[in-house]
Structure formats: structure tokens, C-alpha cells
Image (spheres, grey):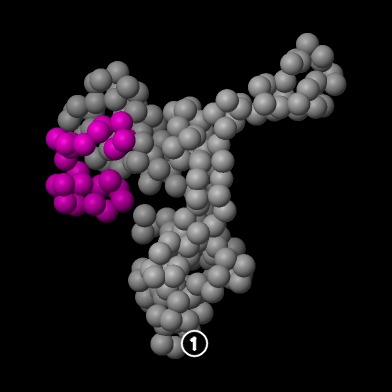
């Protein structure tokens, strides 16, 4: 995730090519520049969670953050992960499939250890593939839809939202509490504008007013 988020202790490359260590944990910086990124509370600075976004940052954009990066529409890594997920669902995810899907994704990310690259002999393959999507495609707008099609809303979208461990006694930052209603929230409400055009769309999906 080092290429996706900025976390306490991580390395940051500035526009001039110099690198520096990031200090986000309160009280960890020793200079004004180091203290600039420290977490000051959910309502004080840009990060409510204690993490910052690194993906999409273009180190070559030296003027007012005018990044020259293309908008991500569809990635080859997504295709590989779709294939791996489909093979796992069919009970056909083996070392050969792994070596043409997960392995090249991790190699591209810079992993070299055999523990990361070789086909796992322990652990639940479904969980491994789903976590790979979570890591590789983070902040690209796909996570919510993955959770919906997995019918895993109660697992991932219900409960306390937690941030980094900058709370009291080194506990996680506690943000809002979310609730996911499995009887309603896998479907959206039919828009009122569409119902007005076609009354045959009634009744609305369960849990929404007509």
C-alpha cells in the first residue's frame, strides 16, 4: 500500500526529487516542517483517518499540482484479478493460474520475496484474491461495487469506521458508525423522476418509499 497511501514513517518524494520521512503521529515531528503533516483531529486538517492519498500523485507536476496522469478507466490488473477471482469461484485457481495473474501484479508492485510471489499453500484463496483487489485497486472507485456483488455489505460496511492508531492509549481513531441493512442496501431506490415517467416501476425496491 506504500504506493497508494501516505502513512506515518513513510517516504515522500518532493517535486525537486528529494525524499523525506513523513510524520503524521501527533508529537512525532521535531521541526516545523516535520510537524506540518501531523494529525490534529478529524475536523482540523485534510485527513480524518490519519492517512493521506498518494496514488495519482505526479512528482513531475511542479506547477500548482497540474498532474499529467491519465484518468484510470480500466486496468490490465483488474482483468487479471477478474480472471483469478472467476477461477477461484470455479475451484480452478492453481499455481499455473496464480503465475499469470497475482504473481505479475505483485512483481510490478516491487515484491521479490518468494512468500509474496509463490502460490499460497495455506489460507483461504477467496479471501486472498479479494484482498488483492482491495490493495491493488484501492481508491479507484471499485471497492463498493466489489462488496455489493460479493453480498458482503454486513462484513465491510457495517460498524465503526476506524483510522490510524493515534487515539488515546494508542487506540484507533474512531470516526462515524455506519449501518448496512441487508434487506435494503444491496439495491438503490428507483429515482422519483423515473417513477413519474413510468408508474409500472412501482413498487419501489424494498425499504424505499414509493
Horizontal relation, residue 42 to residue 198: left or right: left
Q: Which residues are magenta?
A: 106-129
Q: Residue furthest top?
A: 200
Above or below, 17 against 83 in this view is below
Residue 109 drawn at (x, y percent):
31, 51
* Mark 1 neighbour class, 10 Å CA radius: few under 14, some 14 to 19, many 20 or more: few
Q: Quadrant of residue 92?
A: top left
- Quadrant for the C terminus, please: top right
- Residue name at image x 78 percent, y 11 percent: 200
- Residue name at image x 36 percent, y 36 percent: 130
Q: Residue furthest right?
A: 196
- Residue name at image x 85 percent, y 21 percent: 196
**94 drawn magenta:** no
Q: Is residue 73 visible?
A: no
Residue 93 drawn at (x, y percent):
24, 26
- Quadrant for the N terminus, please: bottom left
Q: Quadrant of residue 46?
A: bottom right
- Residue name at image x 43 percent, y 81 percent: 27
Residue 59 drawn at (x, y percent):
47, 66
Per the image, the residue denoted by label 1 is 32
Q: Is residue 61 visible?
A: yes
Horizontal relation, residue 94 to residue 61: left or right: left
Above or below, 202 against 159 in this view is above
**109 drawn magenta:** yes
Amino acid at each position: 500500500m506504500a504506493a497508494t497511501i501516505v502513512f506515518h514513517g513513510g517516504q515522500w518524494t518532493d517535486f525537486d526529487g528529494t525524499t523525506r520521512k513523513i510524520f503524521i503521529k501527533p508529537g512525532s515531528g521535531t521541526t516545523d516542517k516535520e510537524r506540518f503533516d501531523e494529525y490534529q483531529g478529524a475536523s482540523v486538517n485534510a485527513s480524518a483517518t490519519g492517512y493521506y492519498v498518494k496514488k495519482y500523485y505526479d512528482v513531475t507536476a511542479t506547477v500548482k499540482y497540474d498532474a499529467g496522469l491519465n484518468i484510470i478507466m480500466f486496468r490490465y490488473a483488474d482483468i487479471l484479478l477478474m480472471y483469478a477471482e472467476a477461477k477461484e469461484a470455479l475451484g480452478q485457481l492453481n499455481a499455473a493460474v496464480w503465475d499469470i495473474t497475482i504473481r505479475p501484479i505483485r512483481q510490478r508492485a516491487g515484491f521479490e520475496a518468494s512468500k509474496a510471489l509463490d502460490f499460497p499453500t495455506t489460507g483461504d484463496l477467496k479471501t486472498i484474491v479479494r484482498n488483492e483487489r482491495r490493495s491493488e485497486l484501492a481508491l479507484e472507485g471499485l471497492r463498493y461495487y466489489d462488496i455489493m456483488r460479493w453480498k458482503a455489505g454486513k462484513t465491510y460496511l457495517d460498524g465503526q469506521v476506524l483510522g490510524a492508531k493515534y487515539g488515546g492509549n494508542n487506540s484507533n481513531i474512531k470516526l462515524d458508525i455506519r449501518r448496512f441493512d441487508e434487506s435494503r442496501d444491496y439495491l438503490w431506490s428507483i429515482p422519483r423522476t423515473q417513477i413519474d415517467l413510468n408508474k409500472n416501476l412501482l413498487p419501489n425496491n424494498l425499504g424505499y418509499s414509493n
